[in-house]
Each structure stands twice: as C-alpha cells, then as structure tokens.
Image: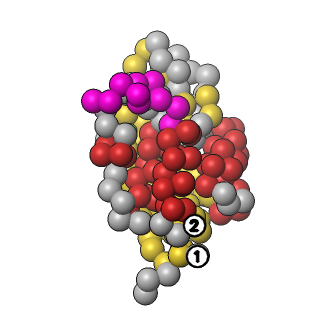
C-alpha cells in the first residue's frame, strides 16, 4: 500500500528553572521549563518526527541540526510548519495525529484543547484529527526530571 503511511516520534527534554514551558505551542505557567537548543517543545518535536518518519524524510535532528545557530531558540511551531510543507511537497497530507505527553508535573489537562488546536492549525486538519493526552509515570521513569512526548500519525498521498 502506497497511499497511506504511519509514523512514530518520541522526544524528551529536561526540566530546568528559568525557562518558559511550551508544549504543543502553548505556554504553560510553571516555575520550570524545558531545556533545549530550540524552544524545547517536546510535544511538537515528537509530532514532527512522527510526520517525517511516516514520509521517510529523516528526523528533526538532521533537518534542523543543533549545530546550526538558525535554530537556537527556534519556535518549534514554525518548524512544524516547515515539516508539513516538506510533506506537501512530496504529495503527502496529514490524516490524523495521536500523541501522549509524559509528565509528573504540572497538571496539563486545562491546556490540552489549545495544544490540539495549535497542532491541527499547523497541520491543516481539524482538531478532531488531533489527539493529545497526558499521563504521569507514577513517580517512576522521568520522575519529574523532564517531560516526554510520544506520537503516532497517519499521512496519506493526495
Ligand atoms: Mg526535542
């Protein structure tokens, strides 16, 4: 089957004081933020890698290398827009996205509708096609040291 592809993406960033916390392009008021070369939006990074993987176009590390100062402090929402454009150039459209954020803190539920709207808007789909959930790891795993995100997506050939 050539018309449909699935992709998977995963990302983790460390929580540190003195940084803004951005997830799904949404700023979340919290005493700490994610450390990274870009704005460190782990959710959007996982979405980008899922889309790139589905189209077999590599990953964000090769597309937007940390060695390139153009991406220092980069707005990940804008980078996601570039990924979607790249896919469109190859004849691909986003079908749906389903992601999970792994975080002990803060509580993310109130921000999830905004994350879904942001991602949907950039990907050119309705928010009905973007699932975002949040889970903790019951004090295991990242244990509050960072925030991770995992994503699967479906793309289709137009
Ligand atoms: Mg990342």
> What x and y, as percent, mark residue 71?
41, 30
Neighbour class for label 2 at 10 Å: few (<14), some, many (≥20)? Answer: many
Q: Nearer the viewer, residue 24 or 102?
A: 24
Q: Is residue 16 visible?
A: yes
Relative image position of residue 88 (x, y in whole percent): 54, 62
Q: Residue at x 51, y 47 (%)?
A: 82
Q: Quadrant of residue 35?
A: top left
Mark 1: give few (<14), some (14-19) or many (20+) Cα within 10 Å: few
Q: Secondary structure at mark 1?
A: loop
- How far separated are the C-alphas under marks 2 and 1? 7 Å
Residue labelled with disc 1: 158
As drawn, 55 above or below 82 = below
Q: Which circle marks residue 93 in the picture? A: 2
Residue plotted at (47% across, 29% down): 74
- Asked where in the image residue 58 lies, by quadrant, the reply is bottom left
**63 horizontally vs 44: left or right:** left
Q: Residue furthest front?
A: 89
Left-right relation of 70 to 82: left
The foreground one among 122 and 82 is 82
- Helix or strand or loop: what does disc 2 sit on? strand
Q: Is residue 144 visible in this depiction of the protein?
A: no
Q: Quadrant of the N terminus?
A: bottom left
Furthest-top residue in this view: 18
> Does label 2 or label 1 sit earlier along the sequence?
2
Image mark for residue 65: none
Residue 69 sits inside the magenta stretch: yes
């Amino acid at each position: 089957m050539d018309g449909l592809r699935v992709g998977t993406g995963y990302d983790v960033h460390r929580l540190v004081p003195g940084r803004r916390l951005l997830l799904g392009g949404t700023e979340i008021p919290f005493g700490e933020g994610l450390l990274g070369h870009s704005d460190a939006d782990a959710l959007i990074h996982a979405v980008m890698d899922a889309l790139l993987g589905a189209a077999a176009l590599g990953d964000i590390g090769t597309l937007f290398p940390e060695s390139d100062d153009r991406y220092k402090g980069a707005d990940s929402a804008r980078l996601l827009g570039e990924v979607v454009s790249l896919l469109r150039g190859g004849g691909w459209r986003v079908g749906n996205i389903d992601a999970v954020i792994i975080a002990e803190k803060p509580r993310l539920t109130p921000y999830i509708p905004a994350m879904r709207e942001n991602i949907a808007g950039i990907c050119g789909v309705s928010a009905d096609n973007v699932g975002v959930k949040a889970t903790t790891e019951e004090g295991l795993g990242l244990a509050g040291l960072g925030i991770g995100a995992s994503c699967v997506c479906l793309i289709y050939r137009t």
